[in-house]
Image (tube, rainbow, N blue to C red):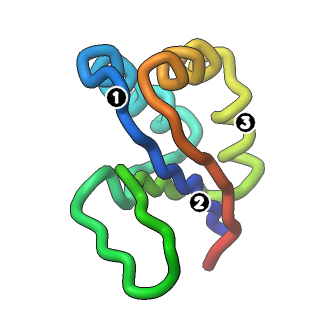
Amino acid sequence: MAAYLIVDVEVTNPAGYDEYRRQVPATLAKYGGRFVVRGGASETLEGDWAPKRVVVVEFPSMEALKRWYGSAEYKPLIALRQKHSTGDVITVEGA
């Protein structure tokens, strides 16, 4: 079953965050991840959620997603992302 990483991120340092964005795709490919949404306009139709920048990444399974997130390749990028942005990260299993 596919699994999705959903991120709502507010970039606080665009130059530093660009370095993160440049490095992430190669780490995703190794674990079968692919961007479904990467920024773009959003509109709240119900509720109070006002996301800053939404990113959705699809993986072939929750196992693959968690292996990527815990990988040696991605771990230093987490610190880089957190240094230059704030946000929320969740996982969801899907069809």
Which is closer to the viewer, label 3 or label 2?
A: 2
> Which of these two is toward me, 62 or 10?
10
Q: Quadrant of the N terminus?
A: bottom right
Badge 2 crowding class, 10 Å Cα cut-off, few under 14, some 14 to 19, many 20 or more, is many
Q: List x then y, in percent, for residue 76.
A: 58, 13
Please name the amino acid that badge 2 sits on: Tyr
Q: Which residue is mark 3?
A: 67
Image marks 1 and 2: residues in contact by CB distance under 8 Å: no
> Which of these two is toward me, 86 or 7?
86
Which numbered disc, 3 or 2, marks the residue that appears first in the sequence? 2
User: Residue drawn at (46%, 86%), measured in percent from left and top?
Assistant: 46
User: Residue drawn at (58%, 16%), measured in percent from left and top?
Assistant: 79
- Alpha-carbon span between mark 3 and mark 1: 19 Å
Q: Secondary structure at mark 1?
A: helix
Q: Is 21 situated left or right of 2 in this image?
A: left
Q: List x then y, in percent, for residue 43.
A: 30, 75
User: Residue drawn at (73%, 28%), measured in percent from left and top?
Assistant: 70
Please name the amino acid that badge 3 sits on: Arg
Q: Which residue is mark 2?
A: 4
